[in-house]
Amino acid sequence: VSAIDSAGLLQVLQRKRDGETLTDGELRQWFRAVVDGAVDDAQLGAFAMAVWLRGMTDAETRAMTLAMRDCGERMDWRQAGLDGPVLDKHSTGGVGDLTSLVLAPMVAACGGYMPMLSGRALGHTGGTLDKLAAIPGLLIEPDPRQLRRVVRDAGFALFPASSRVVPADRRLYEVRDRTATVDSIPLITASILAKKLAGGSQALALDVKCGNGANLPDARLTVPLARLLVETAASAGLRCTAWLSDMNQPLVADIGDSLEMRLALAYLRGDVLPSRLHALCMTLGCELLLLGGLAQDLEQAHERLERARSSGAAAERFMRMCRGLGGPADLLEDPARYLHPAPLRVALTATRSGTLASIDTRALGLAVQALRADAGPAGGLEAVAELGAQMESGTALAWIHARDTASLERVQPMLQRAFVIGDDAVAPPCLFHGAPLRGG
Ligand code: URA
């Protein structure tokens, strides 16, 4: 890719600002300049905003995805001596969504390999890497040799886009978070698929969130996003299936880095079975086993995955990863020793009796990010009530984990507004919205 000068950079910005279609060559030069540092944060923010406002054609989004994929190294697992398929899963971002933390070791215990390029918190949604970083001592950014070793031994790893792999996404991701440009179909598509394509997997299960806690809350945009993701992946040679899953309430009742990590361990140990998390894991996991040729039919896939968790094999895989990256060897037996609660734990109570009719999931996510900014990984919400639950006045809608009273008081009003209690019975939403979309 030939270098682009400052006049060229300006021209790319002007053309996108005016709603024109950028060429493959322009996008490749642009992202090369992003990685080289020739594009500064102001320009990158302007680019993100222009794409947000003007959109992109499907072909342009595909070209942006490939340009981002190619501006860094691509991972090649063929040399790693793996004896099973390399598989991947990604979500468009949710609240209380710890699926990757448990699905990857479950699939690994069934013979698949899941080296997953993961993200930090984005907007109001949590980040898998932040949840993992709640484990003291665990190395979040292993070097390529360490990564290969852990993937070979544990069957999975969750690691960030680095200065080597999709380096452009790392910068663009941070800039989007600060410029109100997270919720853009082309930017989400390129961000997710550039990472997944560079990650070297053979098949991908996507979880496209719908509802008021999704990155794209406008329901009219969810299906187009899922379709573009599946078609862009297929056109780049990656087999992919996308599910539309509900995010009108958190996926699990405990939200926050440490709380979710504790729940993930409890689920892998077989102590708890949160119904929506379990259903999502089984659905995405079965698809991955089928795509990877690790099961002959759905029934067999279901049985293998269920056994991987209930036998403790998945938990054992998780601990291989944890130990392999320098985390505590007794994390599974004694999580409370490492995943500490916040100093303050206070109930948010219902102000009237009735049925929990709606939850502003985005507000919950924002409150958790605010609690986390003060209390670190310990900040969060525990035992959040479910849609359709019968509440008595004065009982807990959730327990707030905060650093101090000032922090608590900052989030209490927004949390109180986030829960709406009504008189009529409410049917909880279905976990899946319609049939999955398949491509490739
Ligand atoms: N996950 C990503 O990696 N990128 C996005 O833009 C949204 C979710």
Image (cartoon, rainbow, N blue to C red):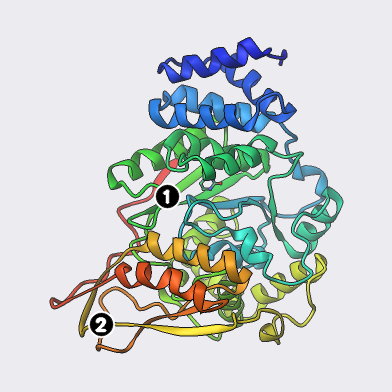
Quadrant of the rendered image containing residue 307:
bottom right
Q: Report the residue at 29% width, 47% height from top.
A: 219
- Residue type at mark 1? Asn
Count neighbours of disc 2 (C-alpha within 10 A) and say few if under 14, some if 14 to 19, many if 20 or more: some
On screen, residue 323 versus residue 336, left or right, reads: right
Disc number placed over residue 129 in the picture, else none: none
Count neighbours of disc 1 (C-alpha within 10 A) and say few if under 14, some if 14 to 19, many if 20 or more: many
Residue 252 seen from this side? no
Quadrant of the rendered image containing residue 114:
bottom right
- Residue type at mark 2? Thr
Q: Report the residue at 62% width, 44% height from top.
A: 202
Measured Cα–Cα span from mark 1 to mark 2? 29 Å
Q: How many marks?
A: 2
Q: Report the residue at 65% width, 18% height from top.
A: 29
Please report whichever mark, 1 or 2, sits nearer to the chain's N-terminal start. Answer: 1
Q: Where is residue 35 in the image (x, y as percent from the top left)?
A: 71, 30
Q: What element carries label 1?
A: loop
Using the image, determine if residue 212 lies above or below residue 98.
Answer: above
Mark 2 CB in 8 Å range of ligand 1? Answer: no
Residue most toward the left?
A: 424
Q: Mark 2 points at which residue?
A: 351
Disc number placed over residue 215 in the picture, else none: 1
Using the image, determine if residue 161 lies above or below residue 126.
Answer: above
Q: Is mark 2 on a helix, strand or loop?
A: loop
